Amino acid sequence: MMVAGSGWAADRGDVLREEIARWQQRRVAELTAEDGWLTLVGLHFMKEGDNTVGSAADNDIVLAKSPARVGTIQVAAGGKVSLVCAAGTDVRVDGGVVGAAELKWAEPKKPTLVTTGSLTFFVVDRGGKKALRVKDRAAESRARFVGLDYFATDPTWRREARWQPFEKSRLMPIKNMLGQTEMELVPGKAVFTHEGRLVELLAIDEGRDVPLFFVVADETNGKETYGGGRFLYAEWPKEGATTIILDFNRMENPPCAFTAFSTCPLPPKENRLPFTVRAGEQSYRGAH
C-alpha cells in the first residue's frame, strides 16, 4: 500500500499544512473548553449502597470546592444510580433544580450531569464498577494550560491504507490505565507498508456516527511523545471503498497526558509499532 503519493506531498503539502493547522486549533479549543479534559479533577469509585458527597471531611466522596453537603448517591445492586440532594444546597441536575434524580450512565455520550458551583460530576462505569467523574471549569490545569507542541507537518505521514473489515466484528480485550480490561468492538484493520514492513492496525468501533478509533504506540513514546501511546482517528471508508486515510500528523495525546483522573485505553500489542512516528502531538510540557 502506498503513501498518499509523492505527488501529493509535492503538490499539496501547503494544503495539508493549512488543514493540520486548523485541526490543531480545533484540538486546543476542545481541550480548553469548559467541559474539556483539562477540567477533569477527580474520579471516585463508589460502593454499593449510600455514598455521601460534599466538601466536609466525613463524606464518602470529598469534593473540595463543593458545599459541605451535596447529597447522597445511592448505587443499587442492579446498577441503578440515584442522587438525593441535600436540603438548602444549590445543586442542579441537567440544569434543573430537583430534590432527587436518577443518574443515568449507560449512554456515555449523554450521562446525567450534576452541577454545583464550578463543579460538574456524572457517573461512569469502569470494569463494572460505578465511579463519579468530576470536572471543574475553574481547574488549575485549565487556567495554566501551556499549549501543545507538534512535530512539523509531514505529508509523507499521510498514508492510504487498505481497510480490511472482519466478516463479523470481534470483541477484543483492551487494558486501560487502571489495569482493568474492557471489551471493545473491533470491526477490522487498516493495512499499509512502512519501509518494506507490513503494518496492520486494529480499529475500535465507537459508533458509525464517529470516526474509527486507533490506539497506537511507537518508538517515540516516553521520549518525544506520551509514554502510554497516542490516539488516531480515521473516517470510515465510504460505501464501496476499500481504503481509508491514516494521517499520523493528527496523532494526539490521550486524556491521561493531561489529567491523572482519566482511564485511557492502552495500545493492544497489535498496534505497537517497532519504529518511530515523528508526526503529530508531542509530550505535553505542562503534564501533571
Image (cartoon, rainbow, N blue to C red):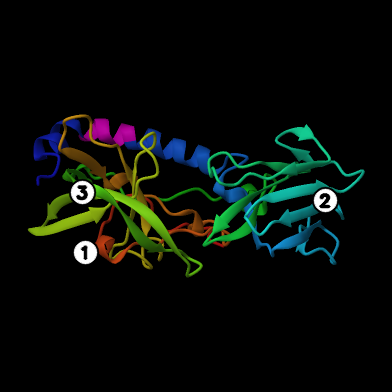
Residue 144 appears in view: no
Q: Disc 3 on helix, strand or loop? A: strand
Outermost residue, bottom side = 179
Q: Earlier in the sequence, mark 1 or mark 3?
A: 3
The answer to which quarter of the image holds residue 209 is: top left
Closest to the camera, between mark 1 and mark 2, is: 2
Q: Nearer the viewer, residue 205 or 177?
A: 205
Q: How many marks?
A: 3
Label 1–label 2 contact, CB within 8 A: no
Mark 1 to mark 2 CA distance (whole Å): 50 Å
The residue under label 1 is 275
**Which portion, as a residue range, is magenta?**
13-19
Label ID, residue 190: 3
Amino acid type at mark 1? Phe
The residue under label 2 is 70
Q: Position of residue 253 (x, y in %)?
A: 42, 54
Up the image or down, 234 lies above or below 193; here it is above
Amino acid type at mark 2? Val
Up the image or down, 181 lies above or below 240; here it is below
Closest to the camera, between mark 1 and mark 3, is: 3
Q: Position of residue 23 (x, y in %)?
A: 39, 36
Q: Residue at x 22, y 40 (%)?
A: 245
Q: Earlier in the sequence, mark 1 or mark 2?
A: 2
Amino acid type at mark 3? Ala
Q: Position of residue 288 (x, y in %)?
A: 57, 62
Mark 1 to mark 3 CA distance (whole Å): 17 Å
Relative horizontal placement of residue 247, taking residue 41 as reference (left or right): left
Q: Residue at x 74, y 55 (%)?
A: 74
Outermost residue, left side = 196
